[in-house]
Image: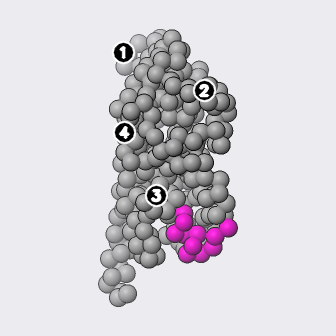
Amino acid sequence: MTRTARTTRTARTARTYWVAGTGVLLALLFAVAATVASASGGDDGDPGTSARAPGLYSPDAGFARDMAVHHQQAVEMSFIVRDRTKDEAVRGLAYDIANTQANQRGMLLGWLDLWGLPKVVADEPPMSWMASTEQESGGHAGHDMSGQDTAGHDMAGHDMSGQDMGGHDMGGAVTKPGALMPGMATKEELAQLGAAEGRDAEVLFLQLMTDHHKGGVAMARGCAAQCKTPAERALAQGMVEAQQSEITLMADMLKQRGAAPRG
């Protein structure tokens, strides 16, 4: 590769990092500001009142719970690959993903605390909020339990066979057998990543994280369309934009390694 080509590739990668990082930062800043404003009195300017908290089975609460779990795996995969390669580009991307998604996860869990809602609901299947409506009464409307035991969000008990929830288009993201939610890796894939080294680890990480981001984008789009909390909708839209930028970046990084995204 010529020096000019290397310089062009480096500049393109740097621009993509900047776009992704800026989108996430703006979303985080907006969401924090909106959360503080809401906690301080909402939109009516009365410091003695605040917006009514979302219901237990609302899209707002369901997205917060599910995306917190989804983000946790992204953080885990990023820490795994950090120790499996010395490639600075992959390590830098992993650091950015871990830092961003850990911060966003904290915000989502913080909202649940603010709303007085649990972080885990034993009888709530993953992604069921995609088919639900706002339920301030705490009812189960829109939740097809299908007789499944979903206590504790156990990974082995949630094979959704790639089907969408309640007819909602998941943007091509599917839940594969053995995974909890769209885009998430299986235990076997995490073990494979932990055993890989060098280029093999880099390629597998980029492929797994591309799938992970595609699932995350589909979930975030669902919240951006259905959630009622303005700050949460803004955060979800920021996730869509930032993760799409990172998907483009990871496709380029895979191409540099003679590989391509899966599927």
**Label 1's element?**
loop
Question: Which residue appears at 65% of the width and 43% of the height?
Answer: 156
The answer to which quarter of the image holds residue 16 is bottom left
Question: Which residue appears at 32% of the width and 84% of the height?
Answer: 4
Question: Which residue appears at 52% of the width and 69% of the height?
Answer: 203
The answer to which quarter of the image holds residue 120 is top right
Residue under pointer 3: 210
189, above or below 31, in the image: below
Which residues make up the magenta segment? 195-205
Label 3 or label 1, whichever comes before in sequence order = 1
Q: Toward the viewer: 180 or 244?
A: 180
Q: Position of residue 180 (x, y in %)?
A: 58, 43
Q: Position of residue 177 (x, y in %)?
A: 57, 48
Label 4 or label 1, whichever comes before in sequence order = 1
Q: Which mark is residue 169?
A: 4
Label 2 or label 4, whichever comes before in sequence order = 2
257, above or below 122, in the image: below
235, above or below 54, in the image: below
Which amino acid does the dot numbered 4 rest on? Answer: Asp
Residue under pointer 1: 44
Q: Position of residue 211 (x, y in %)?
A: 47, 55
**Label 4's element?**
loop
Q: Toward the viewer: 114 or 225?
A: 225
